[in-house]
Image (cartoon, rainbow, N blue to C red):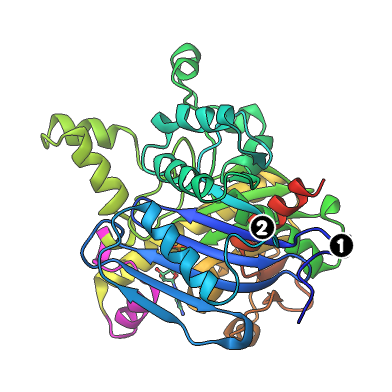
């Protein structure tokens, strides 16, 4: 049997939990070799059609599925715990060192991963008004995990933390300071765990110390954000008070003139909730062409579909604007890096986003760009002034690593 403790005899496993409003994603990692022991997803919590898919990674076991109503997060986590126990990886195991929770909004207070105390949980609760969709689900996940293992350290890893280094002139909106401060209105940024991981991995790929490297990270998943990272510190990012600002996303508009919202209220007679729904759920790629999956959009573009082509062009144009803006913010760029579902998989998006940026020292080698791989890789030509790279993100590994480092300090 393989040893399950670190060389100093301490427990080495970390359970990572990502609790959404109707879903829980979990991964159990062994931090001795950063291997994944099991992964799982519970979705449609509270509906009749709930589903749990559990994949035991060790030994390559086949995924197991449970269907039928899972009433709430507590039941979801209990079901996940049962699946883990069936693989000999129960949450009651002394080998479990900690549980790491993804928490979306940490406001200004949390710039580091934090052991969750009652006071920390209260502060996460105080941030609900600025993250009404996300923090309540994260809190539910934390409370449920605490009830299951009250003795175990639980750590919050915040999506906003990496961006707390943004200078004030990047974080401030140019609105009345008293009003902004009274309501904690400023740019916080999200996807920070991914931007941190990917910018660090990029420095490794370039074979240079993080402190010497300036990177533009393009995290293009269903949600999407860009960041400018100078010497390992975030200096600018595209999401703001909420994840709505910035790039064109699967269902979110990204940047719009804020007057669009008054116009929709005054002229179109829409309520605030309807406008919220429109900009967050019915805009972006889905609003432009009816699809938010880049594979489907590319298939339609190849068939000559004009709405899909327009959606693709709007998406890519926004990316180019941010690459240009962040080049100016950084002054010197060493690498532009693509990550997440679209960034890692869509060669046409990467090619189109970089096309025409030769003046910035940016180019993509078509053969390198066409390679499909799960490994970090360069896609720029050897003689390029600025590297262009694809670096797969791994938010769970980053959360587990930060959690483990904190509890073993
Ligand atoms: P999330 O923000 O939900 O974590 P992901 O990072 O998993 O999202 O990205 C999901 C998106 O990635 C999908 O909506 C799809 O547009 C895109 N995607 C996934 N695989 C491919 C692929 N092979 N080619 C192009 N796009 C892809």
Left or right position of 48 against 97: left
Kindly identify which numbered label has been placed on residue 102: none
Relative horizontal placement of residue 86, taking residue 403 as reference (left or right): left
From this view, report whether residue 391 is shown above or below residue 183. Answer: below
The correct choice, above or below, for 320 with respect to 381 in the image is: above
For marks 1 and 2, give the CA distance. 24 Å
Place of residue 139 in the rendered image (x, y in percent of width and height, measured from the top left): 46, 41
Q: What residue is disc 1 on?
A: 208
Q: Magenta stretch containing residue 288, yes or no?
A: yes
Residue at 25 percent across and 64 percent down: it is 69
Q: Which mark is residue 400?
A: 2
Question: 1 and 153: which one is in front?
Answer: 1
Quadrant in which the N terminus appears: bottom right
Q: What span is colored magenta in the figure?
A: 287-304
Looking at the rendering, which quadrant does residue 48 occupy?
Answer: bottom left
| Residue 363 at x, y percent in the picture | 65, 72
* 196 sits left or right of 70 in the view: right
Q: Does the magenta portion include 178?
A: no
Between residue 107 and residue 143, name the one nearer to us: 143
Comparing 257 with 158, the one in front is 158
Whether pointer 1 and pointer 2 mark residues with C-beta atoms closer than 8 Å, the reply is no
In front: label 1 or label 2 = 2
Q: Please, what secondary structure does the residue beneath circle 1 have?
A: loop
Image point (56%, 30%), residue name? 118
Spot occupied by residue 173 in the image (x, y as percentages of width and height): 50, 27
Q: Give the quarter the ligand 1 occupies.
A: bottom left
């Amino acid at each position: 049997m393989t040893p399950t403790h670190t060389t100093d005899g301490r427990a080495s496993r970390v359970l990572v939990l990502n609790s959404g409003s109707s879903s829980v994603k979990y991964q159990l990692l062994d931090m001795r070799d950063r291997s994944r022991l099991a992964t799982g997803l519970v979705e449609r919590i509270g509906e009749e059609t709930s589903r749990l898919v559990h994949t035991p990674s060790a030994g390559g076991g086949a995924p197991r599925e449970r269907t039928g109503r899972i009433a709430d997060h507590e039941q979801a986590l209990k079901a996940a715990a049962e699946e883990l126990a069936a693989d000999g990886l129960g949450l009651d195991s002394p080998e479990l060192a900690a549980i790491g929770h993804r928490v979306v909004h940490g406001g200004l207070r949390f710039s580091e991963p934090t052991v969750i105390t009652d006071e920390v949980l209260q502060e996460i609760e105080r941030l609900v008004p600025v993250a009404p969709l996300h923090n309540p689900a994260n809190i539910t996940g934390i409370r449920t995990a605490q009830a299951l293992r009250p003795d175990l350290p639980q750590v919050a890893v915040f999506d906003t933390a990496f961006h707390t280094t943004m200078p004030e002139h990047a974080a401030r909106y140019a609105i009345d300071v008293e009003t902004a401060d009274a309501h904690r209105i400023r740019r916080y940024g999200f996807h920070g765990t991914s931007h941190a991981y990917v910018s660090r991995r990029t420095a490794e790929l370039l074979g240079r110390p993080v402190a010497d490297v300036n990177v533009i990270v393009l995290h293009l998943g269903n949600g999407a954000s860009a960041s400018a990272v100078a010497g390992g510190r975030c200096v600018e990012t595209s999401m703001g008070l909420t994840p709505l600002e910035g790039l064109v996303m699967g269902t979110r508009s990204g940047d719009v003139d804020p007057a669009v919202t008054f116009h929709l209220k005054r002229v179109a007679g829409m309520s605030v909730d309807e406008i919220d729904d429109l900009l967050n759920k019915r805009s972006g790629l889905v609003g432009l062409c009816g699809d938010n999956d880049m594979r489907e959009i590319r298939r339609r573009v190849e068939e000559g579909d004009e709405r899909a082509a327009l959606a693709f062009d709007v998406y890519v144009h926004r990316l180019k604007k941010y690459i240009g803006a962040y080049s100016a913010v950084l002054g010197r760029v060493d690498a532009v890096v693509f990550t997440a579902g679209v960034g890692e998989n869509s060669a046409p998006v990467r090619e189109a986003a970089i096309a025409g940026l030769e003046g910035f020292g940016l180019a993509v080698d078509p053969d390198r760009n066409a390679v499909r791989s799960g490994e970090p890789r360069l896609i720029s030509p050897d003689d390029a002034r600025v590297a262009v790279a694809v670096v797969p993100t791994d938010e769970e590994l980053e959360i587990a690593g930060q959690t483990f480092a904190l509890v073993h300090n």
